[in-house]
Image (cartoon, rainbow, N blue to C red):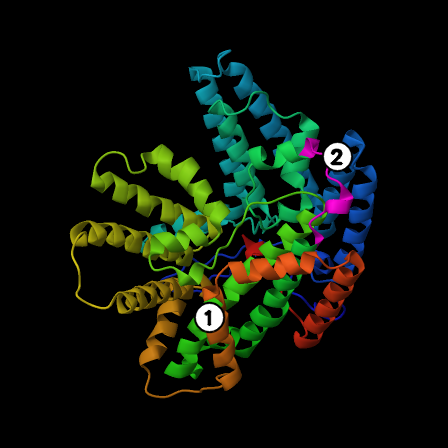
């Protein structure tokens, strides 16, 4: 869509301020050429070519695979061709290690000492590459600050590493593939072409969903009929995702979130409170909007992705929130971290430790900043508290109307999530506390606060309480339209989105992770 990404940022906002609560280090996300973002003309042209070529070549399975791989390379290389080498390296290393792990299993698919060690090597190598690009400068700066605090003056050089876009997502997908082979879940490993298509597929490459090879690979051998492609569902997802990103997310960011978080001392309690709630909606609209578009695009190519969001802000417990928010990351952390750590097995203390540790690691996965650690700690602490309270209050009634109890539960969980988002969004821990402190200020600007803002926030939350059957019926009804009418409706909807959206829309928030 023309004009929407003039001057889009190339460098991420993950910059640390010079203060006692933050390590003074900066890393950048290489956004490259922002014109290949989903809501752009360049991507529309790219996808039209891919869509046409994909369905023409789909009967020819090998040619189709090479075509999709080439298209994915163009998509990723459009951001920065240099990082294609990193993607190819990840593909080569993990395919080779997956094959080695498979050959180390017994004929019955049972694990051996050799297979276990190879899986460990794969995990270490993948996390080592991720750690180098994402955390090297952070840890060097942390050590430097600690040494300075005890009087030892050091000034090591920082590498100022540019973070390759999507590295956290395709690294987790690669790890899951090798671990699943090590668990004996594959009768045979993927050939290198299939694995390359899986890991590089452009629709989920840079910001998920985190798709497992066992979900993706079997679809490569299917022969979908283009006459029965789920275009109605796909178009609805694409329109919904575009609306969330271009209209909702961008409006909230420019109207109040960015100004308040950039200079909280200038704003009063009302503006700060609205900014906190607005950011909760912004990040949901931004990330789930990307996911909707990605799932819709994949559907148009005959590929199904797992669901990634399920109305998370209706959750009555934090555990339920994580069953609804970034669901593919949640199940990855559960299956490849929480359960291997012991999960619910063992003592309650061990279970609480596992919960807390997983959320801390989940926070660090998002970025090299102590604010993400605090974000994870808030979620981990509340999850542990939920388990403790649930155990002590089981079988006890409060004597209050059930609806009131649910309302209280919702209010508490939603505000805990919003509190954690403050640290997620802030550039430093001190910055987060400074913003929270303004909630108790006696004066300050209310700039940005308006009836429209309130309506957008309330309507965005209320929309998640709409029963799923209603949008599902709309999708079924839309699917009965003739393809030409569906395309015309989508085109008209995108024109409306373009008209409603502001100029200079920023890249998707989760591109920086």
**Residue 351: x %, y % from top left:** 27, 41
Confirm whether residue 49 shows in the render: yes
Magenta stretch? 220-231
| Residue 65: mark | 2
**Residue 365: x %, y % from top left:** 46, 48
- Identify the residue at image location x=46%, y=69%: 461
Query: Residue 226 in magenta?
Result: yes
- Identify the residue at image location x=77%, y=44%: 226
Q: Secondary structure at mark 2?
A: helix
Query: Residue 352 in magenta?
Result: no
Confirm whether residue 145 shows in the render: no
**Residue 108: x %, y % from top left:** 48, 13
Q: Which residue is mark 1?
A: 462
Camera-side residue of 142 and 206: 206
Nearest to N terminus: mark 2 or mark 1: 2
In this image, 1 relative to 319: left or right? Answer: right
Looking at the image, residue 368 lies above or below residue 435:
above
- Identify the residue at image location x=36%, y=62%: 21
Camera-side residue of 85 and 47: 47
Camera-side residue of 150 and 117: 117
| Label 2 – label 1 distance at C-alpha | 42 Å
In this image, 398 relative to 332: left or right? Answer: left
Looking at the image, residue 200 lies above or below residue 240:
above
Q: Residue furthest top?
A: 107
């Amino acid at each position: 869509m023309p004009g929407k990404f003039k001057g889009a940022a190339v460098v991420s906002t993950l910059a640390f301020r010079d203060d006692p609560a933050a390590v003074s280090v900066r890393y950048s996300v290489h956004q490259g050429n922002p014109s290949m973002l989903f809501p752009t003309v360049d991507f529309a042209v790219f996808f039209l070519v891919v869509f046409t070529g994909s369905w023409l070549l789909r009967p020819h399975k090998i040619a189709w695979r090479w075509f999709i791989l080439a298209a994915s390379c163009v998509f990723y290389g459009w951001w920065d061709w240099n990082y294609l080498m990193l993607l190819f390296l990840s593909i080569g290393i993990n395919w080779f290690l997956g094959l080695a792990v498979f050959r180390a299993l017994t004929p019955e698919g049972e694990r051996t000492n050799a297979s276990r060690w190879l899986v460990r090597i794969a995990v270490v190598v993948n996390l080592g590459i991720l750690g180098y690009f994402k955390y090297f400068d952070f840890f060097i700066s942390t050590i430097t600050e600690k040494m300075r605090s005890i009087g030892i003056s050091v000034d090591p050089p920082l590498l100022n590493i540019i973070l390759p876009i999507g590295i956290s997502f395709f690294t987790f997908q690669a790890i899951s593939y090798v671990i699943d082979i090590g668990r004996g879940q594959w009768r045979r490993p993927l050939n290198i072409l299939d694995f390359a298509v899986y890991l590089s597929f452009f629709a989920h490459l840079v910001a998920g969903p985190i798709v497992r090879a066992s979900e993706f690979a079997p679809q490569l051998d299917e022969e979908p009929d283009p006459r029965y492609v789920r275009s109605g569902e796909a178009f609805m997802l694409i329109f919904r995702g575009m609306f969330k990103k271009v209209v909702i997310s961008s409006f909230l960011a420019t109207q109040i979130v960015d100004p308040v978080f950039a200079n909280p001392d200038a704003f009063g309690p009302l503006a700060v409170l609205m900014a906190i709630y607005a950011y909760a909606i912004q990040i949901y609209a931004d990330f789930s909007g990307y996911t909707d578009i990605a799932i819709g695009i994949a559907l148009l190519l005959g590929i199904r992705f797992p669901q990634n969001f399920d109305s998370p802000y209706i959750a009555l417990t934090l555990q339920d929130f994580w069953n609804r928010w970034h669901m593919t990351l949640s199940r990855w952390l559960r299956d490849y971290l929480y359960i291997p750590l012991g999960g619910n097995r063992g003592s309650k203390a061990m279970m609480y430790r596992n919960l807390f540790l997983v959320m801390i690691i989940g926070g660090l996965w998002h970025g090299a900043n102590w604010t993400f650690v605090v974000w994870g700690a808030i979620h981990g602490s509340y999850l542990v508290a939920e388990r403790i309270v649930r155990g002590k209050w089981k079988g006890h009634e409060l004597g209050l109307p059930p609806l009131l109890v649910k309302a209280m539960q919702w209010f508490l969980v939603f505000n805990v999530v919003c509190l954690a988002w403050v640290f997620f969004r802030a550039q430093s821990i001190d910055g987060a506390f400074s913003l929270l402190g303004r909630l108790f200020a006696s004066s300050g600007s209310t700039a940005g606060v308006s009836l429209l803002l309130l309506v957008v926030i309330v309507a965005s939350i209320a929309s998640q309480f709409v029963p799923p059957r209603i949008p599902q019926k709309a999708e079924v009804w839309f699917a009965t339209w003739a393809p030409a009418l569906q395309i015309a409706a989508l085109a008209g909807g995108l024109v409306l989105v373009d008209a409603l959206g502001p100029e200079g829309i920023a890249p998707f928030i989760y591109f920086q992770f």
